[in-house]
Amino acid sequence: MSTVRSLPQRPAAADKREAILRAATSVFARYGYFNAKVADIARAAGVADGTVYLYFRSKEEILHSIFDRTMEEAIAEGRQQLAEISDPREKLRRIARLHLERLGADRDLAVVFQVELRGSIKFMEEFSAAGLAEYLGIIREVLEEGQRAGIFRADLNAKIAAKIFFGALDEMATNWILSKKRYKLAPMADHVLDVFLNGVCAQ
């Protein structure tokens, strides 16, 4: 009785797309977005150059997709975890932790987010209007929740405060990338929260 041997299954389209995005993140971090070539990404992903174009129209679309996917994941995880917390102060702490843990766990992703995504004025204009706006909105909502509860100052401009909070986390991530010292990024969240909630003036 002959045995029919099944052919090895080809990776699903979603898996190939994910492999290309992972490879692109690594390539952009190593060579820089402008120096990287689609051929470099294809080689790192283990696919033909033409396969990349089946999923993405251009190198720029790949960069946008890395940003969109990461922001979608961060926002979804953030909303899920914040739903389990009642204290607005602890919600801010969780946002900070998640933010720095995600970047601290993937240095290539951190380089792409903190350096490569900032290299284009066109992208930066779209950056502020896309996923970042929703992300900042989550922080603003937590601050407004704290204001209603009497925990945060009633005269606080929550929109500006959200940008300041994000900016502090953003700077921690950038400094971590550029620093010659090696240290864990996530614990920096507690330092940011200390200054943000307690200020710098002696009591």
Image (cartoon, rainbow, N blue to C red):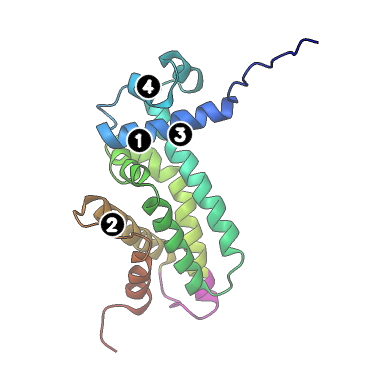
| Marks 3 and 2, how far apart at CA | 23 Å
Q: Are marks 2 and 4 in contact (CB under 8 Å)?
A: no
Instruction: Determine the residue located farthest toward the right in the rendered image.
Output: 1
SS for dot 4 = helix
Quadrant location, the N terminus: top right
Which badge, 3 or 2, comes first in the chain's sequence? 3
| Marks 1 and 2, how far apart at CA | 22 Å
Residue 116's place in the image compared with 14, above or below, is below
Q: What's the amino acid at mark 2?
A: Glu
Label 1 neighbour load within 10 Å: few <14, some 14-19, many 20+: many
Q: Nearer the viewer, mark 2 or mark 4?
A: 4
Which contiguous range is marked in magenta? 145-156
Quadrant location, the C terminus: bottom left
Q: What's the amino acid at mark 3?
A: Ser
| Marks 2 and 4, how far apart at CA | 33 Å
Pointer 1: what residue? 26
Task: Name the residue at 51% across, 28% down.
Answer: 17
Pointer 3: what residue? 65
Q: Quadrant of residue 195?
A: bottom left
Label 4 neighbour load within 10 Å: few <14, some 14-19, many 20+: some
Residue 43's label in the rendered image is 4
Q: Is residue 113 left or right of residue 147?
A: left
Q: Nearer the viewer, mark 3 or mark 1?
A: 1
Which badge, 2 or 4, comes first in the chain's sequence? 4
Q: Quadrant of residue 64?
A: top left
Pointer 2: what residue? 171
